[in-house]
Amino acid sequence: MTRAARTAINDQFELFLPYIADMPLRDQREMMERPFFSLAKTKRVKPIDYTSPDGKAWVHVSANPDYGMATIWDADILIYCASVLADMARRGLNDIPRKLHLMPYDLLRAIHRPTTGRAYELLGQSLDRLVSTTIKTNIRAENRREATFSWLDGWTQLVDERTERSRGMTIELSNWFYEGVLMQGGVLSIDRAYFDLTGGRERWLYKVARKHAGGAGEGGFAISMPTLFEKSGAEGAYRRFKFEIAKIAERDPLPGYTVELEQPDGKREPSLRMRRRTQAAPLPAATPATAPAPKPAAPVATEEENLVDAGTMIRRTLAGLSAKASAGEVTDATMATLRAEYPGWDYQTLHQEFRDWLDADPTRTPVNYQKAFIGFVRRFHEKNRHRL
């Protein structure tokens, strides 16, 4: 690397460092409601195919089998980059670069990640998925029938040749993403607490709520459950998705927004209503002091019981009841055990995989559902902990 190149990189770092910690966070508007990312932490290679209800917009996302599809957690890097570009535009910079020079430490801190050696390794894996995932869409394709791109055109780790210490990295953004951020109204502000959401569905629901309910007034925004399912691009059956959304609505965990199920007149399927959270409706605590002691869960033996359980939860939620279903649900005590002994995983996705595993064989009827699920997570953790 030449002296001039090193100086240019150092100048770029000097530009970022003074304001990076307090920089307002922004997300690209068009990416907040379409199914552009996998919602699971497990590797996904199945493509996403989505067409809007009016047939005007479509998205196809395909994954490289070696890396898997970019996840909604990988998209945190794009939120960081969008925030940097938007802040440069706000400060009136004339030449806003598409290739950003940054320090990984700043990036990890901004998106609420640890700064351990393992975190840097996982950051590299996320960047690889953002480079290798291919998107085809007619959204903002202008005079063309479609636009084809990856989220990043490339990234490079910069190392001092003498000391072999990191001098930061460069991230080259795709033209589609870059133009989307800088166009008029191309970004929306997001709450920093978004990065603390652990589930992929919760993260995606926050984006949908921010996009649609942010300026919808007191009535908020309602969307039918089947339409929400199509927009998510989630793998698995619709009934499972509906069950998981009902659990999220019961917990109501989104920062700045409240979600609740409702049953429209004359409709068979429920809708999810999203509203701005007011001072009278604060974000509920993770473990309320008044929460009742967890009860032993009944074993799940058949698919019919699962469907009854899901239907019961939805009816209770719609009726405004707070009691938890006892069959096939993970208790607060179990969640506390998992977070303490096997932290870092998407427990909702693992719970869905556990239920699918039970459903696949009627003889798999655990005597103690909670202990069986803990054992399932323990085996998964032992097999995959090197990925954390």
Image (cartoon, rainbow, N blue to C red):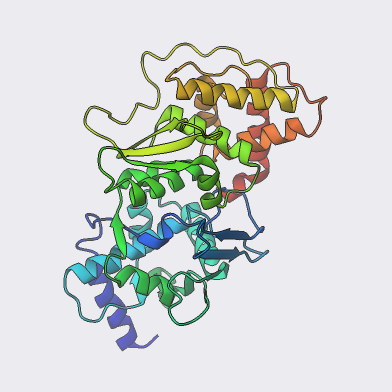
* Image quarter of the N terminus: bottom left
Q: Which image quarter: residue 240?
A: top right
Compared with residue 1, is residue 181 higher up or lower down, i.e. above or below?
Answer: above
Q: Which residue is pictured at 32% across the width and 40% down the height? A: 220
Specify the farthest residue to the front: 266
Q: Is residue 12 left or right of residue 202?
A: left
Q: Which residue is pictured at 45% across the width and 48% down the height? A: 204
Image coordinates of residue 144 in percent, x first then y, are 49, 81
Specify the farthest residue to the left: 91
Compared with residue 40, is residue 320 higher up or lower down, i.e. above or below?
Answer: above
Q: Which residue is pictured at 37% across the width and 19% down the height? A: 288
Image coordinates of residue 72 in percent, x first then y, are 48, 53
Q: Nearer the viewer, residue 126 or 136?
A: 136
Q: Is residue 131 left or right of residue 288?
A: right
Q: Which residue is pictured at 52% across the width and 22% down the height? A: 315
Q: Nearer the viewer, residue 122 or 96?
A: 96
Q: Which image quarter: residue 129?
A: bottom right
Image coordinates of residue 362 in percent, x first then y, are 81, 26
Whether residue 384 is visible to the viewer of this picture, yes or no, is: yes
Q: Is residue 143 left or right of residue 192?
A: right
Q: Nearer the viewer, residue 370 or 190?
A: 190
